[in-house]
Amino acid sequence: MKILVFFLLLLSFSVAGQTYSLKLEVRSEEDHGLIPGAKVELVEDHQKHYLAEGTLEIEVQHPTHHLHITSLGYETVEMDIDLEKQTAYTVYMHLTSIELKEAIVQHDMVSSSDRNASITITGVDRDALLLSNAGSFAENLESIPGISSINVGVGIAKPVIRGLSGLRIQVADAGLRQEGQQWGNDHGLEMDQYGIERLEVIKGPASVVFGPDAMGGVIHVLPEVWTPEGQMHIDLLGGGKTNNGTGFGSIGIKGTKKNVFFSLRSSYKDYGDMAIRSDSFNYNTFRLPVYEERLKNTAGNELNFSGVVGYKGDWGKVFVKASQYRLKQGLFSGAIGIPQAYGLGHEDDYRNIELPAQHVVHTKVDGHGQFRVRRNLISVDAGYQRNNRLEKSMAHFHGYSPAITSDTAHRFLLETYQLRTSVKTTFNVATKLTYGLSLLYQENKIDGFEYLIPNYRSAEGGVFVLLEHNFTKKWATNFGVRGDVAKIVSEEYRKPVYDQDLNVVGENLLSPDIDRFFFNGGAQAGFSYHPNHNSNIKFNFGKTYRFPRAVELAVNGVHHGTFRHEQGDANLQTENGYQFDLSYEFHTNTFLLTLSPFFNYYQNFIFLRASGAFSPLPDAGQLYKYTQADAFLTGGELLVEYHPWKWWHIAAKTQYVYGYNLNSYRNLPFIPPFEATLEFDFIMEMKGRLEKLFFKPQVTGVTAQNKVDVNEKTTPGFFLLNADVGATIQLTKKQKVIVSLGFRNILNTPYYRHLSRYRILDLTEQGFNLVGSVRFPLQFAF
């Protein structure tokens, strides 16, 4: 109670304190003339201003601010100001044809801008996500160099950053960890792909601020942008895909009135069995048919709801968000036992969801607050998540067993409670200090006629400090430290053994009692150097760590979604990483080059490895064991963009990762191959109702992945030709419609994805796919 009273007194003092004058001019670097129509955002205060004449004069409550200044045809400018030192500022903006998507960090999780951050932060907006319009949220991010995905069919996918995924990649939603059963490669992200307005992708170690499971990178979904006062925005989206008969729709409504913000959204997607370029598949040396080149029982549907309500003032803002994600997804019948040829026919129905299948319901309720107290920005985030996953299949058993009447092979019920607080103190425009703590508690309960992981409880806590200092306008540095503790307690699991008369004659110990405590610490240090306006050099070093999760310690059973028997090791040790990232960027007003090499060395790197032995369980396939080894990953990304004319944009992207096991002197498993993409973007600004036309052909080449671990399949290379075409049509002065068509795999090329979980069955990916969408963004005053 005393802490609460003190906190309220601080807020009262911040609101009742003095005001500060800000005078701002935005001018062109070329002729020093004012730029009418520039937009200025005061990030911490959540204020946006339109500069009709290129000037701004306002009164604000706080002395320090981070400004985000944009104008069409100019490079984005980000700057920090201190109104106790200076009240009048002139900003000069450079002309450009290059789309430099500066990441704007509004949730106080990392540096205030990508310019000063020592690691690469890529901003992605709603338009880019909708243009991709892939089968899942994770696959929408694959246009970013260094990002790939692990997929199971159409509706299930999870992101991979520089060869790392799952428990080494953190997905955060407004600062809180997204917590499902992310250990499974057949467990996708439980997020509405049509409900995300903007996000940031951090490639490289971000453990100091985000926690141990961010050692490989972060995908940070940012809070919605609030509408201007007195405005309501309605977003209508619909479309479909020809390959598997997908139909999707999403409706969102949000508005702000008297500083109260609200948002509602619902999305639905329904799809049938996907069409591939394979007429047969391989399962445990059996060759079986794929009828009509359609993969039976890969249909599914997804339903999402979300709502937000919040309030903002001069002191900051608070908001509460609730959401629910519901997925029903069929799995190809090769996932359970040995499929029979007579059971693979479609019976003229491509949309029914049979067994095996996944049913997932993910519910989230979280609250967020940001409060300004003079030079301090205080952030408080708390949330609850309930992940209920049912993996269904025909009742079956190995050996003698009582009759099974349920079709639930596994039920995983994971409940997560978490709290995160941080304080960011701006001493002056050159120096900022951020410190905070995070707490998390989880409880997992299991059910079903099969066993995979035990009941367990886990608790985590961490503290961090991050200092950012700009020595000059050219040199920005940062240094941070973090410490974490974790405890995992899992229950012993013994499976009864029956004789032919169904008498219990013994027990098999599948998982022992586990009670483990972990502690470790890490650090990061880096710099961002601008030798001139056109160049930027970044360097970052991170000492990272990751504690083994319960699944890695205790799993022991057939994981049908990935077609293998997985086995944990209760004696796994903490994983430690030493990670080096370098980035060089050069740009002019028509040219951009970005080169980002990295090198990561790991001690006790935890990974699943094919043992070469078959599971002792019938029809369970190969046995995969969690093991540890010293290892390294290295590689990098290259991005080149050129704008020969305003309406023509050429881009080339490449990415490469190489992983090596230093103990066995072999390659690490499940590493994505080298990939290169060349795209041409033609954009024509029109007059009249037809406002804009665009055409974007693209060719992607992927090399063969022959650098594989023992008993891991190699994958041949391929080329894909894709294209997008669309138009923006002005219906009225304020209303428009956006129409787009995407042509995927135009040549209907048969190809394999190395990270697809269907790769082990020799199943190719989707053939030709026509993707269409129509979007109506509407605005009203109310």
Image: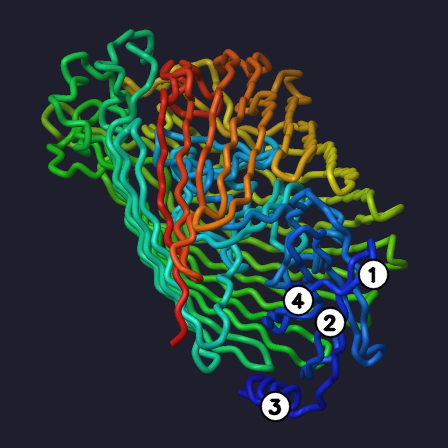
Where residue 773 sits: x, y (%)?
36, 41
Badge 3 amino acid: Ser
- In front of the other: label 1 or label 2? 1
Query: Which residue is disc 3 drawn over?
Result: 12
Query: Which residue is disc 4 drawn over?
Result: 40
Residue at the bottom extreme, as displayed: 16
Mark 4 to mark 2: distance in Å? Answer: 22 Å
Q: Residue at x 69, y 56 (%)?
A: 482
**Numbered label attached to residue 425:** 2
- In front of the other: label 4 or label 1? 1
Is tag 1's residue or tag 2's residue first in the polypeptide sequence? Answer: 1
Q: Residue at x 56, y 15 (%)?
A: 705
Where residue 331 sits: x, y (%)?
28, 29
Badge 2 amino acid: Thr
Is tag 3's residue or tag 1's residue first in the polypeptide sequence? Answer: 3
**Numbered label attached to residue 32:** 1
